[in-house]
Image (cartoon, rainbow, N blue to C red):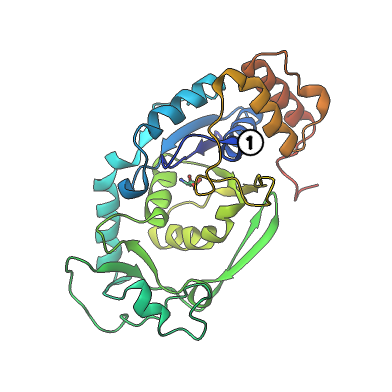
Amino acid sequence: MTYRGRFAPSPTGPLHQGSLVAAVGSYIRAKSQDGIWLVRIEDIDPPREEAGATNSILEALNAHALVSDEPVVFQHQRHDAYRDVLRKLEEDNQLYWCDCTRKSIRATLDDPYGPIVYPGICRDKNLSAEQGRALRIKTGDLLTCFDDQYIGRFEQNLSQETGDFVLLRADGLFSYQLAVVVDDAFQEITEVVRGQDLVDNTPRQLYLQSLLGYPTPAYIHLPLVFNDDGQKLSKQNLAPALDNSKATENICNALKILGYPAEIRNPTQSAAETLQAAIAFERQSPLLIREND
Ligand code: GLU
C-alpha cells in the first residue's frame, strides 16, 4: 500500500515556526517511505480565518520546497461530503440535537473552570433540528486507546473526558472532528503526522472512523515549539510569520527541533537540498518513529 500523508493547516494566520515543524516532519516521513504528501487547507471556520492566510500559507510552503503531490484540497468545497456523513450517522441514531450553551453546560459541572465534559443533558430530549442548535454524537463509557508512534500509548475515555461531542456547531459550521475524519478517509491517508497539541483529539477521530467503517491511519504526534515565555508557538500567541527569504534556515530550525544532527542542517544549501538530506537520514536512522526502537 502506498504511504499517503498530509499537512492540514487552518488558514487562521500565516505559517509560523511551530506549524513548519509539522509540515517538515510530515513531508520527511512521507518521502522517507517513498510516499505521497498532500496539503489540505482546513477552511471550515470563516469567523476564525484571516483574509489572505490561505495564499500566504501556500506561498510559504512553496518557498520552503514543500509541494503537494496532488491538487490541494479545500474543506470549504467539501460541505456536501460532511452533510452526507451527518445524514448517515443520524439514520444510524448516533446523533442528537442540543440547545445547550457553553455557559449553561459550565453551570452544571462540578468544576465550572475545568475542561468541559458534556454531561449528556440533551441526549434524551429528542429536540428537533432548529437554528442555533448543535448536533452531537453519542459516546460510550469505553476506553479508547491507540499507540502513537512518537509518544507511545495514549488512552481516553470519551464519555468521561469529552462527553458527547459536537459534529455540527450551533452556528451551522461543521466541526473539525467531523471534517478531519471525513477528509483523511477521502484522501486515503495512511498516516497522520501533526503536532502534539492535537493528540487528545485523536480518540474522538478513531471513534468516528470506527462508526463510519473507515480505516484508521497510523499516528505520529510531533513535539511543539515554545516561545521564550514557555508558551506554545501558535497563531493565538501571535507567533511571527515565517520569513520566506530564510527558507533553509527555517527548515534547519525545524530539523533541530525534530532532533536531526547538525551535519545535515546546512544553511548554505537550498531548502529542497536540506529536505533531501533529512529524508536520506530518516531512511537510515528514523527519528520520527520512536516506539519501534
Ligand atoms: N487544521 C488543524 C490545525 O491547523 C490541524 C489538523 C490536523 O492535522 O489534523 O491545527
Residue at 28 percent of width and 67 percent of height:
134
Q: Is residue 259 above or below residue 223?
A: above
Q: Is residue 5 above or below residue 156?
A: above
Where does residue 193 sit, x and y in percent of width and height? Answer: 58, 43
Where does residue 86 sit, x and y in percent of width and height? Answer: 28, 59
Residue 72 visible in this rendered orientation of the protein = no
Residue at 42 percent of width and 52 percent of height:
181
Count of labels in the image: 1
Front residue of this view, candidates 287 and 185: 287
Q: Is residue 278 above or below residue 222?
A: above
Residue at 57 percent of width and 30 percent of height:
35
Which amino acid, by three-letter code, is at mark 1?
Gly
Residue at 39 percent of width and 45 percent of height:
183
The residue at which mark 1 appears reads as 25
Q: Is residue 147 above or below residue 51?
A: below
**The N terminus lies in quadrant:** top right
Question: Mark 1 falls on what kind of element?
Answer: helix
Front residue of this view, candidates 86 and 9: 9
Q: Quadrant of residue 89?
A: bottom left
Where does residue 188 sit, x and y in percent of width and height? Answer: 45, 41
**Residue 195 falls left or right of residue 75:** right
Number of residues whose C-alpha sits closer than 10 Å to that of mark 1, classed few (under 14), some (14–19) or many (20 or more): many
**Residue 162 falls left or right of residue 171:** right
Where does residue 239 sit, x and y in percent of width and height? Answer: 56, 41
